Image (tube, rainbow, N blue to C red):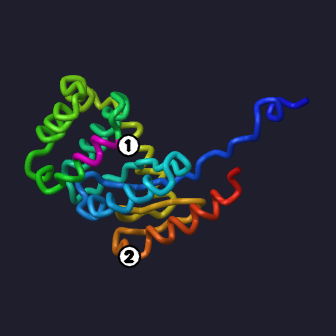
């Protein structure tokens, strides 16, 4: 008798949607409605992973990416990212002060976030995401990758959610 038969039907892994995003990007803010709709439709069957792709034109994007990684460590990654994206214009003016304010507002340890930003504790994660994005052809944000297909939302997001749903539905069709 094999172990999977003893434990019931095998569970399939969720489909994965990587979202190359920049937390100072107005287009990424606009994409939040699509990401929320995808979460609502698929729940935990679609794993949505935030991938960092800070752009040089936004001077606080790199710090925001590092802060988001600290928020992940503190258990509030997506809520933090969404809160920062909701204030992209303000981030351009306020920088790290706004990141710490958002962290505090979410009940995160703002002092620990400040330390993480000063120490660069999450630089490697941000740099690795950016390097991987460049390697697969990401040039702007948001850019989505699902089932090995890159969908560029940096110029237009029109029709992208429908395309992601089409691919996710196909990937998840074999679930039991």
Q: Overall secondary structure of the magenta stretch?
A: helix
Residue bearing mark 2? 158
Q: Is residue 24 left or right of residue 51?
A: left
Query: How much space separates mark 1 and mark 2, taking CA atoms?
Result: 28 Å
Q: Image quadrant for the N terminus? A: top right
The stretch in magenta equals 78-83
Q: Nearer the viewer, mark 1 or mark 2?
A: 2
Residue 112 in picture, x, y percent from top left: 24, 23
Q: Quadrant of residue 38?
A: bottom left
Q: Is residue 80 magenta?
A: yes
Within 10 angstroms of label 1, few (less than 14), some, or many (20 or more) residues?
A: many
Q: Nearer the viewer, residue 4 or 146?
A: 4
Q: Nearer the viewer, residue 163 or 136?
A: 163
Residue bearing mark 1? 126
Q: Is residue 70 magenta?
A: no
Q: Is residue 39 left or right of residue 26?
A: right
Residue depicted at x 29% and y 31%: 120
Q: Which callout, 1 or 2, points at the residue further toward the start of the chain?
A: 1
Residue depicted at x 44% and y 53%: 39
Residue 136 in picture, x, y percent from top left: 51, 60
């Amino acid at each position: 008798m094999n172990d999977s038969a003893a434990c019931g039907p095998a569970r399939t892994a969720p489909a994965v949607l990587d979202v190359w995003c920049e937390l100072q990007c107005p287009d990424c803010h606009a994409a939040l409605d699509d990401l929320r709709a995808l979460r609502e439709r698929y729940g935990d069957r679609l794993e949505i992973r935030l991938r960092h792709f800070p752009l040089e034109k936004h001077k606080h994007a790199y710090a925001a990416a590092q802060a988001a990684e600290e928020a992940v460590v503190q258990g509030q990654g997506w809520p933090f990212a969404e809160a920062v994206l909701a204030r992209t214009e303000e981030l351009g003016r306020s920088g790290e002060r706004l990141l710490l304010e958002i962290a505090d507002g979410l009940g995160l340890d703002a002092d620990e976030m400040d330390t993480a930003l000063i120490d660069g504790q999450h630089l490697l994660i941000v740099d690795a995401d950016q390097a991987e994005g460049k390697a697969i052809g990401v040039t702007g944000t948001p850019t989505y990758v699902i089932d090995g297909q890159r969908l560029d939302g940096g110029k237009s997001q029109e029709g992208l959610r429908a395309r992601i749903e089409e691919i996710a539905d196909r990937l998840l069709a074999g679930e039991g």
